[in-house]
Amino acid sequence: MAKVDEYVSGKILEDAERMLKAIEAVRLPLIGSSIGKRLLEKIEKFNPMQITIDEASAFIKDAKKVAVGQRVCFSLHNRDFTEAVFLDELAEELVNVGKADYMTNEDAINTLRRYSSRNPIITSKVAGKYMEICCSSPRDCVYWNLERTGLRCLRQSKKGLNAKGCDYVME
């Protein structure tokens, strides 16, 4: 299970960088390979799910604390800037270390809306519950890179994909 302290310490970023390098370095098909299986095992703890803006709004409205900051993997590539919303304990700890700022529920939802027409929204579990909501960058995101290799790791929400017909660029 992913832990809050992995986000606070930056370990999550180191793990993401290692995974992206592994994906780039391996020229063999990852489906069914031992490397592919290990990558999927590491991702399973996040139980990543693509969600709609309405679903993201529901998570935010149910949270006790809400913070907004740059998405975790932005510093790996420094392109396609978007922000993520962090909830509850994750929000509190990221604010404490200066990686996010508290926001009202409405401001956090508006932040996601600002990016969601071009960036798919993904939520990830931290400490066993969905506490990270990211307007992902499909060309940089570990999840999307695994998906491109054929390793299916992103669950779809029960409501399906964003009904607005987002223009997701998968370069």
Image: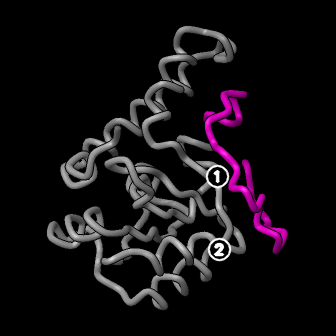
Q: Quadrant of the N terminus?
A: top left
**What's the CA distance linking mark 2 and mark 1?**
17 Å
Horizontal and vertical percent position of residue 16:
41, 39
**The quarter of the displayed image where residue 31 is located:** top right
Give the residue number, with chain letter if any, for mark 1. Answer: 138
Which amino acid, by three-letter code, is at mark 1?
Pro
Q: Nearer the viewer, residue 11 or 81?
A: 11
Instruction: Residue at 48%, 25% (x, y): give it.
Output: 41
Quarter of the image for residue 155 reads top right
Tell me which amino acid carries mark 2.
Answer: Ile
Residue 147 lies within the magenta run:
yes
Q: Residues within 10 Å of mark 2 (few under 14, many from 20)?
A: many
Q: Is residue 133 left or right of residue 116?
A: left
- From the viewer's perspective, is the residue at label 2 or at label 1 nearer? 2
Q: Main secondary structure of the magenta part?
A: loop
Q: What sort of colour scheme is used for the picture?
A: one colour
In the image, residue 4 sits, relative to residue 15, either above or below, namely below
Residue 136 picture quarter: bottom right
Q: Relative to residue 98, is residue 10 depicted above or below?
A: above
Residue 117: in magenta span: no
Q: Residue at x 37, y 72 (%)?
A: 69
| Percent coordinates x, y for residue 61 in the rendering | 47, 81
Residue 81: image location, x then y, percent: 50, 68
- State the SS at label 2: helix
Residue hosting label 2: 53
Pick the residue in front: 16 or 90: 90
**Does label 2 or label 1 sit earlier along the sequence?**
2
Looking at the rendering, the stretch of residues picked out in magenta corresponds to 145-171
